[in-house]
Image (tube, rainbow, N blue to C red):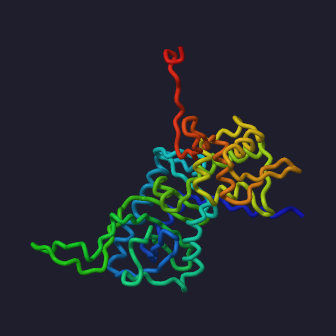
Amino acid sequence: MAEQDTTTEPTDIFLWANQADRDKDQLDIDLFLFTKGYTVYATNYAKELKAQLKVLFLYDMISTVQTGAATGMMVRDFEAAAAEDNVLERTELEKVEHAQEVIEQIMFGEEGLEVFREGEHEFKKVKGIIARFKKQDGEPFFIGKLLPQSQVLKGATAWMYDGDSFQPFSADAGLRITPDNQVLVAGNDCFAFSETKFIRMFGYDAKKFAVAEEKIKEIEAHFKLKFPEGMTFDALVRDTPSLVTKLQKVDPTVVTQDQVVEHADEMGLELMTDDAEGAIIIMDAKDAAKFVNLLNDDYVTSDMTGIKYELKGKKELRVSESTAE
């Protein structure tokens, strides 16, 4: 019996735009806020805002995609594409942990979501806003925008200009929503209309992860490493953003396993080894960081003072020919 293919087809963004354009007058809209820790809150809004919400969130996005269809816009994988004109970057929702976390809270836990109240919660902890668009009995789609603090007006420190005079700001807080296109979640896919804002919104820099994964493969090919059962180097790196960044410039081929172990001993670092297997033991993210720092030659001893340092940044000094002579 043949195995069933469980892969899903990527969302057709051009079909999405045409259907959203067709159904735009029948779409219900719900607004949600999410915090820097990706906790989602429900919100309420006055019915007078519904038309404005479609203008701020939806219409320009539809127009951008439809115009792109007419001008040959390409859809490419976020992990491989570079930000460029007439290219829309796409990735699978399940790859973007925090985006999936936000959407699942809305999809499966909406009834239990707290309603955001400025008196009980704080806008300074809010990271973004999600608008859910849904036609009755249809599949929803979600449009996200960042909410930097520069777009939040606090009632205690803001004024209104009404008619010919300044007046106290009567609300607890005010928001300025920018009309730019940022992120769409449709079906099982995320579309990054703004690469930088997508990365900031959900903390997902796939290009860095892709480089880090290649470095991990090189490291595992050149070094013998040992981890606790169920742990992998890849998982440790994914959970530690500083390691992802550090791996971008590491060249695993310039030093050997013996050199790494010897240098760790010289620096007094507690890098464990398995004498029987000759492997370097990595127990946690702290050990992984120590190992990557050793690969990157980030531990040095000053010839002048004998003090040992961990380097946070460095620049190679190149001796000029005249000085060398």
Q: Is residue 207 visible?
A: no
Q: Where is residue 284 drawn, in percent x and y?
A: 70, 60
Residue lying at the far left in this picture: please name it: 164
Side (left or right) of 253 relative to 45: right
Front-lying residue, 68 or 112: 112
Q: Where is residue 318 drawn, in percent x and y?
A: 53, 26
Give the residue at x 58% y 47%: 310
Residue lying at the far front in this picture: please name it: 305
Q: Is residue 202 visible?
A: yes
User: How many circles with numbers are drawn on the protein?
Assistant: 0
Front-lying residue, 276 or 128: 276
Quadrant position of residue 137: bottom right
Give the residue at x 74% y 41%: 262
Q: Please determine whether, in this image, residue 297 is positioned above or below residue 75.
A: above
Q: Where is residue 223 drawn, in percent x and y?
A: 77, 44
Give the residue at x 81% y 64%: 4
Front-lying residue, 278 or 50: 278
Q: Where is residue 196 drawn, in percent x and y?
A: 47, 53
Give the residue at x 49% y 15%: 322
Quadrant position of residue 103: bottom right
Q: Quadrant of the N terminus?
A: bottom right
Front-lying residue, 168 or 248: 248
